[in-house]
Image (cartoon, coloured by chain):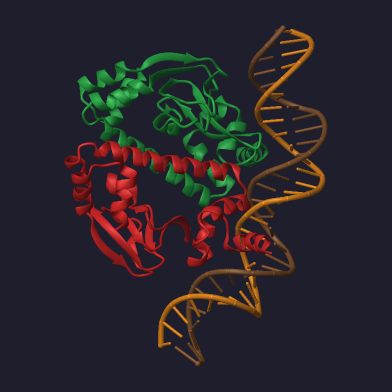
Chain colours: A green, B red, C brown, D orange
Amino acid sequence: MELEFYIRTYFGISKANLEKVVSLFEYSELKKGEFYTKKDQYCGKLSFVESGIVRIYGEKEHKEITQWISTKGHFITDLSSLIFKTPARFNIQALSDTKLFTINKENYDKIGQEVSNWHELEKIFIAKCFITLENRVFDFLSMSAEERYLTFFENNKELFHQIPQIYLASMLGMTAETLSRIRAKKIR
Amino acid sequence: MELEFYIRTYFGISKANLEKVVSLFEYSELKKGEFYTKKDQYCGKLSFVESGIVRIYGEKEHKEITQWISTKGHFITDLSSLIFKTPARFNIQALSDTKLFTINKENYDKIGQEVSNWHELEKIFIAKCFITLENRVFDFLSMSAEERYLTFFENNKELFHQIPQIYLASMLGMTAETLSRIRAKKIR
DNA sequence: ATAATTTCTTGATATTTATCAAGAAGTTTA
DNA sequence: TAAACTTCTTGATAAATATCAAGAAATTAT
């Protein structure tokens, strides 16, 4: 089970606590196309992607803007909604059949009470996410569309066979046509 | 003292703990132009901006890229460096005479030990920062240079009188010339 | 206060990226 | 498997933004 492996590896947690945490997650599946959350609704859950591909996207003037694509080993949620009970800013939808381990808000809050240093571990985890986003912002400030593509492609080659490029283009801040042309230039 | 007010307001903490935390911060000043941290060095401290303006910027092919501008009420640090002891990714420099309250890594870690729910409060604080950055990424994905300017200007009018526009342009992901033209269009 | 330096503005032009359109390729559905 | 639908590619063109340059304005240093 990837979830157990992931938490052990990244959270540095005792065997007993690991089992306690993992036992609070419930297995479920999403069929391709199904929604995990919808924008403006409350997202009172957090999930680990055991396998499959999931798209997080917002809307702006009737356009869908892909914020991020999550694959095996990622956690998904609308963090603002989960923590502050605000309406979700994003839609989250499965781009392929997806296996999840899910914890609801109630149990999520319970971890903090039951596992002594959980808040610290989670703080560090969220800090890592923050740093990743800082770097992503820096990329937008300092790179052209082509450079953004190259950098991302270098680290995520597989994705380009698995899902429509239109979503990757959006996530990289360019149109599908621009991405197509950039790729055509490189491939030949 | 802004620091005390800020922590009380945003961290929801008991009087006794508040004093403990605040007492670990030390007052200091930066003259305009002075550096708080330099890129590639270890940044083992975290500071609260009591007053003044500070620029966080990275470098890319000999160009300075302004990642963020911090003013009164913000915390500054290179988070990656502070938490994981990596070399700082950013330079941090005062754009005006600045008053700071600073805590070093050692005392910063101490708070977590001494204030019982500190990690939880800090987790929530960092989560807020994360959400802010998610929204910033979404802005880059969904807005033109002009829209980014308008949105930012609406919430930060004062800044445009106080510091060179060249930094604001960079932070908004455009050149100084583009920002100048956008502004000329609006003002008349 | 003057000189030196930096920043801002504006014009001319180049480059990047978006938009619109239409056929090709690929995928899903019945 | 054929039809329907979606995505991808490519061309033509438009719009947004960058680059280079030079003078004006503002700021800083002497």
Q: Residue furthest front?
A: B15
Q: Visible in this render: residue B112?
A: yes
Q: Visible in this render: residue B173?
A: no
Residue A79 image offset from top left, x and y in percent: 43, 32
Q: Nearer the viewer, residue A83 or B19?
A: B19
- In this image, B66 relative to B52: left or right? right
The answer to whether residue D5 is above or below residue B33 is above
Residue drawn at 52 percent across, 53 percent down: B155
The answer to whether residue A103 is above or below residue B174 is above
Q: Nearer the viewer, residue B82 or A156?
A: B82
Q: How many marks?
A: 0
Residue A91 image offset from top left, x and y in percent: 54, 28
- In this image, C9 relative to B154: left or right? right
Residue drawn at 23 percent across, 26 percent down: A115
Q: Nearer the viewer, residue C10 or B10?
A: B10
The answer to whether residue A128 is above or below residue B54 is above
Residue drawn at 29 percent across, 58 percent down: B1
Q: Quadrant of residue A19?
A: top left
Residue A75 image offset from top left, x and y in percent: 41, 27
Task: For the C terminus of chain B, give its image quadrant.
Answer: bottom right
Q: Quadrant of residue A161?
A: top right
Residue A17 image offset from top left, x and y in percent: 23, 22
The answer to whether residue D19 is above or below residue A107 is below
- In this image, C14 relative to B60: left or right? right
